[in-house]
Image: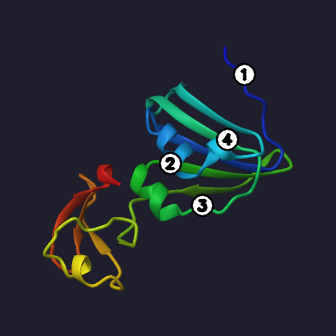
Amino acid sequence: MLNIDSIKNGIVIDHIKAGLGIHIFKYLGLDKADYNVALIKNAESSKLGRKDIVKIENIIDLNYEVLGLIDSNITINIIEDEVITKKIKLTLPEEVVDIIKCKNPRCVTSIEPNIKHIFYLVDSERGEYRCLYCDEAYSNMEV
């Protein structure tokens, strides 16, 4: 059995769909961290079968919208003095601003550089978003 020590103060990102942990690890820049971090891949899970876990021995700012887009089933645990003090259950955000970039060359966001890229959720089952300006469809898997 693999044994990863508990963390004293930090963040545990749990219930990540197996295989997506590395995307979160890279997005958060944890490969360049100067504090303890752990990426656990394919851990056994009674809920998911297999899951990834990211443990961070530090309190860092997280963008819950981006993490929710990567995997809306994530749970974030804030740890203080080796105790979970806060649990945050992520969901797909209803609207995302300047996270997804519209690829439609005829969209106003391609022509006007200062317009925000705004997408709204149209299908939570499929994780489908649409551009506010041109209605171009995107999946949360394209983030």
- Point out residue 30 in the picture as x, y percentages from the top left corner: 63, 46
Q: Which residue is outermost to the top?
A: 1
User: What is the distance, in whole Å, between disc 2 and disc 1 at their CAs?
Assistant: 22 Å
Residue at 25% x, 68% y: name it: 102
Number of the label disc, if any, that sits on residue 55:
4
Q: Residue furthest left?
A: 106
The residue labelled by disc 1 is: 3
Percent of width and height locating residue 106: 13, 75
Q: Secondary structure at mark 2?
A: loop
Would you say the residues marked 4 and 1 are in contact, meaning their CB atoms lie under 8 Å apart? no
Q: Amino acid at mark 3?
A: Leu
Q: Earlier in the sequence, mark 1 or mark 3?
A: 1
Q: Amino acid at mark 2?
A: Ile
- Disc on res. 74: 2
Observer-nearest of 135 and 92: 135
Q: Position of residue 81 (x, y in %)?
A: 86, 49
The vertical placement of 11 against 115, above or below, is above
Question: Who comes first in sequence, dot 2 or dot 4?
Answer: 4
Q: Nearer the viewer, mark 2 or mark 4?
A: 4
| Precedes in sequence: disc 4 or disc 1 | 1
Earlier sequence position, callout 2 versus callout 3: 3
Which label belongs to residue 62?
Answer: 3
